[in-house]
Image (cartoon, helix red, strand yellow):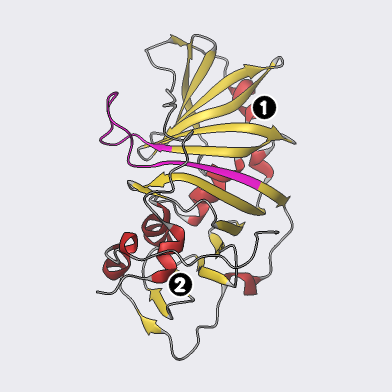
Amino acid sequence: MACLRVLSLVVLLPVLCAGCASSRLRLPDGPGTPVLDFMPLFDAAVAQCDQIQHVDALIRLRGRGGGIGLNTRVRVRAGLSAPGSVRLEGMAPFGGPVFVLVAQPGEATLWLTRDKRVVRDVPAEDMLESLVGVSLSPAALRSVLTGCLVADRRPMTARAIGDWVAVDLAGGAVAYLERIDGAYRLTAGSRDGLAIYYDQFLGGLPREVRVISQTGADADSEPQTDLTASLSQVNTNVALPASAFDIDIPPDVIPMTLRELRGAGPLDAPVEPSTSSDSR
């Protein structure tokens, strides 16, 4: 099938960020020493992100997803609301959005605006995986981006590993607390085969989130997914209107399957040259 121009703007093999793949971070490892009175530490570490029900931000992505390098010129305007609503707009350096993904509990739509194609009746996490190589539901994406790691933060046990406190959460996720300026902060974690690292905190929330796939990776191979999301223009707990998570699809748009989306072959399509500078 013909390659989709819209996805060629989102992914492009040669445009790998030189610094993203060069440093392979490692989560603290080892059995550690049991920590009994860890609840106050954990509660303090997630106090800020635990209060966030709504968030919108501008996100710059760099690195690669699913083994494919991302075009670093593409930014994403993201809006997320509890319990499970999301709106993502892929913004090219010129023109209108290249894609719009909206989802509410039980439904999701991905509109590829420039190719006049639409994907429906597919979970939002599958759409997101096709775009950037990371499968996260709207609720999971909100938790990851705001520094809380997972929506279900029921701590089970904890252990000290060096200077870290590793807190085992319900569902198999692990939150790693690091002591910074006299207080513990959630700066890393693992969930669903992903290692997640937080940095550049502002107002108690991270402005840089790095996601690295762990499944199938070993010490000598590069992970399939190694993405860094830099957040700016962050607004929290300003309720987004319900209309933000809905979209009117033009009548001339052609339905597309998830299989077609995944097999679109974006690497063969040339990136359109920009005719204006990116001043936004």
Q: Which residue is mark 1?
A: 44
Indicate which disc, 1 or 2, sits on the residue closer to the N terminus.
1
Which circle marks residue 109 in the picture? 2
Residue at the far bottom: name it: 251
When the figure is inspected, residue 163 is found, relative to residue 108, above or below; the finding is above
* Drawn side of residue 218 relative to residue 107, left or right: left
* Amino acid type for the residue under numbered disc 1: Ala
* Mark 1 or 2, closer to the camera: 2
- Eyeballing the image, is 253 above or below 59? below
Foreground residue among 234 and 276: 276
The chief SS type of the magenta part is loop
Question: x%, y% of residue 176?
Answer: 51, 24
Judged from the image, the secondary structure of the residue bearing numbered disc 1 is helix
Q: Give the residue displayed 58% in from the left and 70% down from the top.
A: 245
The quadrant of the rendering that contains the C terminus is bottom right
Which x, y percent locates residue 141?
A: 51, 50
Q: Is residue 214 magenta?
A: yes
* Residue 148 shows up from this direction: no
Query: In the image, is 173 to the left or to the right of 261?
Result: right
**SS category of the residue bearing label 2:** strand
